[in-house]
Amino acid sequence: MSALAPPGPEATRPAPPRNALRHRLAERGVDRTLLLLVPGLLASAALFCYPFLYGLQISFQPKTGGFFGSYRAFFGNSFAVGSIGITFKLALPAAIINVGAAVPISYRMRKEFRGKRLLLALLVVPITLGTVLTAEGIVEFFGPVGWFNQTLHALGLAASPVKLTYDYWGVLLSLIISGFPFAFLLTNSYLSGIHPALERAAATLGADWRQRFRHITFPLLLPGLMTTFCLTFVLAFAVFPSAMMVGDPDGRTHVISVEAYETALEHFNYSEGSAIAMVMTALMLAVVGVAMGLRSRLYRGSTGGKG
């Protein structure tokens, strides 16, 4: 009879959880997988947050000139301030060209064709080379005695070498070569997230590929392109090896990163060098903020104002 008796209240009470922390997180509706972010957050704090805050502190500790002395020294130097415009003249065209070129190539790469894997490998190869090797390759290929100018001379197309290195165009070409793979991979991933059934439905209604791309694919892709633009712009805005190796660091390619480097490590003015780095960071964040604001409006428009 005792074996058939109903269980008492102690027997029906749930067993205590094996992991008290896991139980408390579950009760509060916290996803435990978010704990995987902890190592990344610690690494970001150690590798980015601390150096940034340390540099920000140094920028307000000049030897002379008061609290904002380093910032006044930078903005009071017309040659140094001119590096801001030079940097934008390089970063904006490079980002726009990379994003603009990535769209048609990624759109074509959605379909299977012969040699697709080989072409994909060739498009991604510059990532493995790095900025320094890319700059050296440009100097060797497009230099005054490089293969490019030798070919033009042999074909009788140019009597004198075409200047594409140690100038603005060499740096811009380096930024395009090194930045395009990132723009292509990001654009290709965004395009893969657009369901092909949308275009097939438009095709059944008589829309050709241009109309399908203009009215369906491109509006859905545009928010992602804004994010791609931000990443490629930041990559190009922080240009340093290309400006030093392929450009004219004391003239037409005297970008703001070169100005910060020379101020801190050649003139040993660490406070002003840190101030220039802070100005550089503020400019990048301003452009990214504007682009992200436009992206949010585009995203709301592409979803009909929902979400």
Image (tube, rainbow, N blue to C red):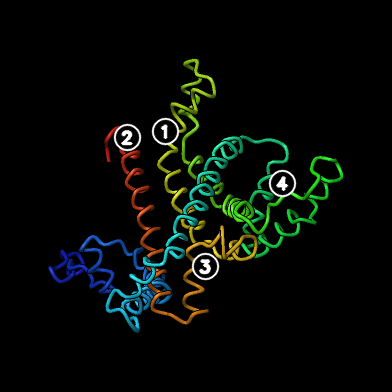
In the picture, which quadrant includes the C terminus?
Answer: top left
Q: Which residue is mark 4?
A: 118
Identity of the amino acid at label 1? Pro
Chain-order first, disc 1 or disc 3: 1
Identity of the amino acid at label 3? Val
Residue 13 coordinates in the image, percent (x, y): 17, 68
In the picture, which quadrant includes the N terminus?
Answer: bottom left
Chain-order first, disc 4 or disc 3: 4
Q: Which residue is mark 3?
A: 258
The secondary element bearing badge 2 is classed as helix
As drawn, 212 above or below 181: above
Q: Which residue is mark 1?
A: 219
Identity of the amino acid at label 4? Leu
Check contact, mark 1 vs mark 4: CB within 8 A: no
Estimate the spatial distance between the alpha carbons at disc 1 and disc 2, rounded to whole Å.
Answer: 9 Å
Chain-order first, disc 2 or disc 4: 4
Quarter where residue 305 is shown = top left
- Mark nearer the viewer, 4 or 3: 3
Identity of the amino acid at label 2? Gly
* Crowd rating for badge 3 (residues with CA inside 10 Å; few <14, some 14–19, many 20+): many
Residue 30 relative to residue 13: left or right: right
State the residue in front, 90 or 86.
86
Tell me the number on the disc at residue 301: 2
- Mark nearer the viewer, 1 or 4: 1
